[in-house]
Image (cartoon, rainbow, N blue to C red):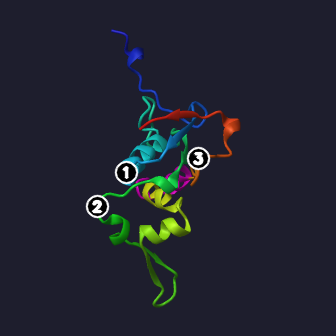
Amino acid sequence: MNTLSYKTVSANAKTVNKQWVVVDAQGEILGRLASKIAMIIRGKNKPEYTPHVDCGDNVIVINADKVKLTGNKFSDKTYISYTGYPGGQRFISPKELMAKHPTRVIEKAVRGMLPKTKLGAKLYTNLFVYAGSEHPHAAQSPTTITL
């Protein structure tokens, strides 16, 4: 038996094949969309996935302002932030956040599904979210995928 054919291949920064993909968020449910985007950014959809390497694709999300939330989450859910000062805890609902910054709802959902490590912070930089249907990444010739 040839044992060389059973070697485990571990990806590294030089051997990884990163691509650009476009995801249309129009009419999609936020949590389901974010979990699929997080898997693509992480690289878990590839056979050469390696946990400690950035082997995922760069994801461009368009139409972020047309994403849906089920139930009463649009008004009842709260995002909590802290300014660092006493009494500085701030609360905002997705409805208010969509009015101010429509891209941040998807960014927060995807960021929460990535690892809370240095690698997770690096992976988060592979996400590009835009409120409209236009994006400035045409030079990368991204492929459109449906989730």
Question: From mark 2 to mark 1, how far is it between C-alphas?
Answer: 11 Å
Specify whether residue 43 is painted magenta: no
- Residue 86 horizontal/vertical position (percent): 47, 90
Mark 2 Cα-neighbour bin, 10 Å: few <14, some 14–19, many ≥20: few
Residue bearing mark 3: 133
Q: What element carries label 1?
A: loop
Give me the residue at 44% from left, 47% from top.
Answer: 38
Along the line of sight, which residue is nearer the eye, 137 or 47?
Answer: 137
Mark 1 Cα-neighbour bin, 10 Å: few <14, some 14–19, many ≥20: some
Along the line of sight, which residue is nearer the eye, 85 or 63?
Answer: 63
Q: What element carries label 2?
A: loop
Span colored in magenta? 112-124
Along the line of sight, which residue is nearer the eye, 13 or 103?
Answer: 103
Indicate the amino acid at tag 3: Ser
Left-right relation of 138 to 7: right
Residue bearing mark 1: 29
Residue bearing mark 2: 71
Mark 2 and mark 1 residues within 8 Å of each other at the beta carbon: no
The relative height of residue 140 versus residue 70 in the rendered view (above or below) is above
Specify whether residue 123 is painted magenta: yes
Give me the residue at 44% from left, 31% from top.
Answer: 46
Give me the residue at 36% from left, 48% from top.
Answer: 32
- Residue 15 horizontal/vertical position (percent): 58, 30
Indicate the amino acid at tag 2: Gly
The relative height of residue 79 versus residue 132 in the rendered view (above or below) is below
